[in-house]
Image (cartoon, grey):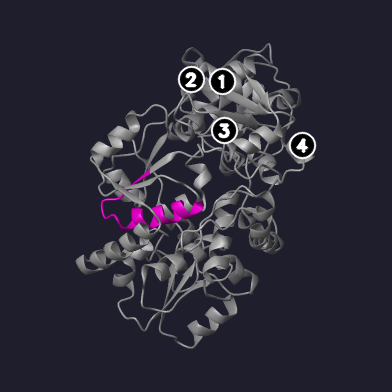
Amino acid sequence: MLRPLSPAVVKSMLTDGEELALIDVREELIYSQKHLLWGRSVPLSRIELRFARLVPRKSTRIVLVDDGDGLVERAAAILMNAGYVDIYYLDGGVAGWEKAGLVTFSGMHVPSKAFGEFVEHDSGTPSVSAQELDAMLRSGTNMKVLDSRPFEEFSRVSIPTGIDVPGAELVLRVRDIVPSPETTIVVNCAGRTRSIIGAQSLIDAGVPNKVVALRNGTMGWHLAGLKTASGETTRFPDVSDKGLAWACSSAEAVAKKHGVQRIDRAGVARLQADTSRTTYVFDVRDPDEYKRGHFPGAVSAPGGQLVQATDTYAGTLGARIVLSDDKAARALMTGAWLRRMGWQEVFVLAEAGDESGDLAPALLGAPASAKAVDPSAAIEIDDVTVIDLSSSPRYRRGHIPGAWFAIRSRLEHALPKIAPRGPVLLTSEDGVLAGLAVADAQALTDRPVQWIRGGNAAWAAAGFPLSTAERLADDPLDVWLKPYERPGDPKAGMQEYLTWEVDLIDRIKQDGTCDFLDSEGRRAAHG
């Protein structure tokens, strides 16, 4: 049975030492405008696709959050049908939380972003402005620019001369990239968090070089009117034996200081056998290494991304976290940061594994197989209305000609605008979401509803055309766009975003539920 909890009770749960999954089921853009600090964004429209991996233990204490608009009841029905048993909801929703005098936040990945600001404030992480870095480059300063983002982000836009070294790879690779202690190291990302964490990682590890973060990253570079690079492919080199030995020794010292524990396979098995607790196993290596072989069941979570967006990987607060890395250094550094973020039980498994490829999807429920049609059959259906439940960015990049964009959880708003005259065909990126949504759509229309097996990917693979002409049956509330992804001049959005990041440190003090640890391991950010 779904049970309400007052804001005061929910806040007390955040600090009672027990596991808790605080899940916000509103659409991502709505969530980004106002939400609870520790709430994980799992929109109702995609809950079957994301929830099982985020909250794997069926007896986890779960509190659902909405705007008091009935979404929690719909989400709870799906979760209870999947076997989750301990489900509550925040009485009055987000408005009720505010009415009780409690703090809300805007933006995405707020705990991680706030932690980056805390680290800079606590450690005094040195930084340079875009103008200062430009002057250094022009004067021929002996320096290396290390970009701490994943390769996809780096190749899209980067600082001239930059080398892609995603966050967790920095300590592992730095001595091979920068052999001379006379070389200045500049660490950048798109904004602030990964620049700060990356630079401070090198400093904490004892790199003899001068290390600075690029203040405000590529956004700051753009705002300064400087030209970025694009399409770059320069990546980190293989690690040498000497570089690995230094990295492991340095990372071990940092991890030991912050209480990270070592574990072996037998130890992981014992943790996983404990059904009263949640144990996440994250592989913090480069995704290509993960695909070649990983610990069975481990989720790919490159260390830099795990620190800067922890809420997208770990849905249960108070869970145990095991970090897998056959070279150890990446897991040790990542583990130290997670400990400082407030995760109490963090373990390093210094091995990979022999399970190759990507993890199979973890779904709640199954697509309605009896209602599936192949693309070749779909194209023969007369007077059909195609409704695309893909994310709005994916829809805009290409969809079945004539397809309407709609959000699965808001079909009751979209269908009157679409007004189908004949059969309805649902589609999505790979068809899975469409298959899951058949019953939802059929309950709202007297027209027969089917879905395209394989979705838009299968349609394109069959040689059928895609279109970019838009038919929007709903506003694109499903995603929060980064400042540089938004239409029009991005400068105002970039400046607003950077100001938002800087202001987070004061905001979390008002909230009072953070347990960030300072550089000496002392609790320092309760508010």
Which of 464/10 is in front?
Answer: 10
Q: Dot 3 corresponds to which residue? A: 400
Mark 4 vs 1, N-terminal side: 1
Mark 2 vs 3, N-terminal side: 2
Is 521 positioned to the left or the right of 45 in the image?
left
Q: Dot 2 corresponds to which residue? A: 365
Task: Locate residue 438: give its quadrant.
Answer: top right
Q: Which residues are magenta?
A: 322-341
Q: Dot 4: what SS?
A: helix
Q: Is residue 202 magenta?
A: no
Residue 305 seen in the figure: no
In the rendered structure, find residue 470 and report the number of the disc placed on it.
none
Between the C-alphas of marks 4 and 1, the distance is 24 Å
Mark 2 vs 1, N-terminal side: 1
Residue 327 seen in the figure: yes
In percent of width and height, residue 369 lies at 46, 16
Between the C-alphas of marks 4 and 2, the distance is 31 Å
Q: Dot 4 corresponds to which residue? A: 95
The residue type indicated by label 1 comes to: Ile
Q: Dot 1 corresponds to which residue? A: 78
Q: Nearer the viewer, mark 4 or mark 3?
A: 4
